[in-house]
Image (cartoon, rainbow, N blue to C red):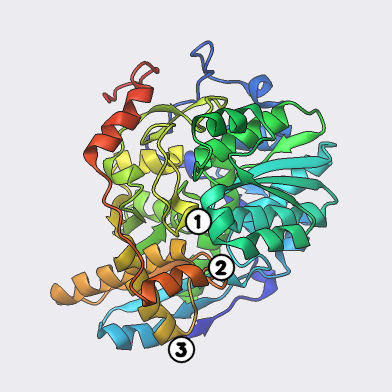
Amino acid sequence: MDAKITLPESELPRSWYNVLADAPTPPQPPLHPGTGQPVGPDDLAPLFPMDLILQEVSTDSEIAIPEEVLDVLRLWRPTPLHRARRLEQAIGTRSRIYYKNESVSPAGSHKPNTAVAQAYYSARAGRTRLATETGAGQWGSALALASQVFGLECKVYMVRVSYDQKPYRRVMMETWGASVVPSPSPDTNAGRAVLEQDAESPGSLGIAISEAVEDAAGRDDTSYSLGSVLNHVLLHQTVIGQEARRQLELAGETGVDVVVGCVGGGSNFGGLALPFVRDKIAGAEIEIVACEPAACPTLTRGPYAYDFGDTGRLTPLVPMHTLGHDFVPPGIHAGGLRYHGAAPIVSQLVLDGLVRAEAFGQKDVFAAAIEFARSEAIIPAPETAHAIKGAIDAARCADEAGTEQVIVFNLSGHGHFDMGAYDAYLHGRLEDFELPEAEIERALKAIEDLPKPAGVSV
């Protein structure tokens, strides 16, 4: 079998898969921060077009992808699945490792899968402008592209540490017509409040979300767009896993043993993993592993609790694993994983034992990235290098047990704009960040007085 498994355009998925139709325990509802009651469509209407609100709460197993969205997705989808034969040889494993290459999209990551859909629905609803946040810049790049396709203005609040570390991500967004500012910024009340406390704040996704939500809520012509966490975002990403399942069949694999993805909010992990979660719920023996930074260990060290999705407490209260909404992660180079919370769907699957979480140090992650780059020739983004580390660990674990396994991971983005991070690693300047328990305890004080999920103690 060829090392690259492709699908014809005719096999591009025509619908998104909704795991809420099959999940044994549906996530608990988001709550209105003022009343403590479940939020309704009217509460979300100032931020999102109604089509996305209905998708957010849907329990339909499949939701049809609009033809206008498919027309754009066809520019790069279906994406290839690769057998990582050279990586297998480099680490001396008997297992078979596959990776879904989402870096072939125009923006270089998986993010356009939902950006295109969100821009389409906002344009159809008559909105003319989008406001969003971005960490490493992958999401901002994708939304800038999608906004250009559907003729929308785009304002991006980019986490300051990434704005400084990754200037060419900003240039990519601006090339596609977006306006980009470092967050915290003087453009919003939320940003100004942070700057008054710390003029040199590195920012966080929580702060940037506050700015983007404030921006969108204050303008009738603007939708808020989020690149991860919410149900409809993970829904749009399931084209990844649906394609991968079919490609593994074409590769002659009768089953999968391990599915691996990196997790910040959960979009690329969910996109690959959720179709396989359906198989696991049906009885398949699959280990599904969510890999996160040790510097931002949301799933591995954060409690499951109601928390705000943003630092400024503007969003609904969301049930999720969290480190606290005012937690500011260290300035690791995997900027897309520097988020205090995780998607409610992913959090619930971890609680149910359908997903297992692991956390890795930055140096170990970059060692895996270098091993992959020197064997498979693709330089991965620091975020997706966490999944590479997880896949290599799974293969080595299988070798120690004397078994052969089929392992698949999501290569969710390339690292062409992350040379500063690679330079730091290759020349001994890259730091590991071991998050002190005292910092987690401090940050979690912010959620002590918030409502508690039913049946769960914080």
Can you name the residue that lies furthest to the left here? 401
Q: Percent position (x, y) of residue 284?
A: 32, 58
Q: State how far apart marks 3 and 1 are (Cα).
A: 27 Å
The first of marks 2 and 1 along the sequence is 2
Q: Considering only vertical position in the picture, is 247 above or below 326?
A: below
Q: State how far apart marks 2 and 1 are (Cα).
A: 9 Å
Q: Percent position (x, y) of residue 193?
A: 57, 27
**Residue labelled with disc 1:** 268
The residue shown at (34%, 66%) is 365
Position of 192 with respect to 363 (left or right) is right
Tag 3–tag 2 contact (CB < 8 Å): no
Pointer 3 local density, CA inside 10 Å: few below 14, some 14–19, many at least 20: few
- Indicate which label's residue lies in the foreground, 3 or 2: 2
The first of marks 3 and 1 along the sequence is 3
Point out which mark residue 50 bears: none
Q: Considering only vertical position in the picture, is 363 above or below 158?
A: below
Point out which mark residue 1 bears: 3
- The kind of secondary structure element at disc 1 is helix
Residue nearest the observer in this picture, 250 or 236:
236
Pointer 1 local density, CA inside 10 Å: few below 14, some 14–19, many at least 20: many
Position of 335 with respect to 357 (left or right) is right
Which amino acid, by three-letter code, is at mark 3?
Answer: Met
Q: Considering only vertical position in the picture, is 181 above or below 80?
A: above
Tag 3–tag 1 contact (CB < 8 Å): no
Which amino acid, by three-letter code, is at mark 2?
Answer: Glu
Tag 2–tag 1 contact (CB < 8 Å): yes
Q: Percent position (x, y) of residue 270?
A: 47, 52
Q: Is residue 101 visible?
A: yes
Quadrant of the drawing holding the C terminus: top left
**Residue labelled with disc 2:** 102
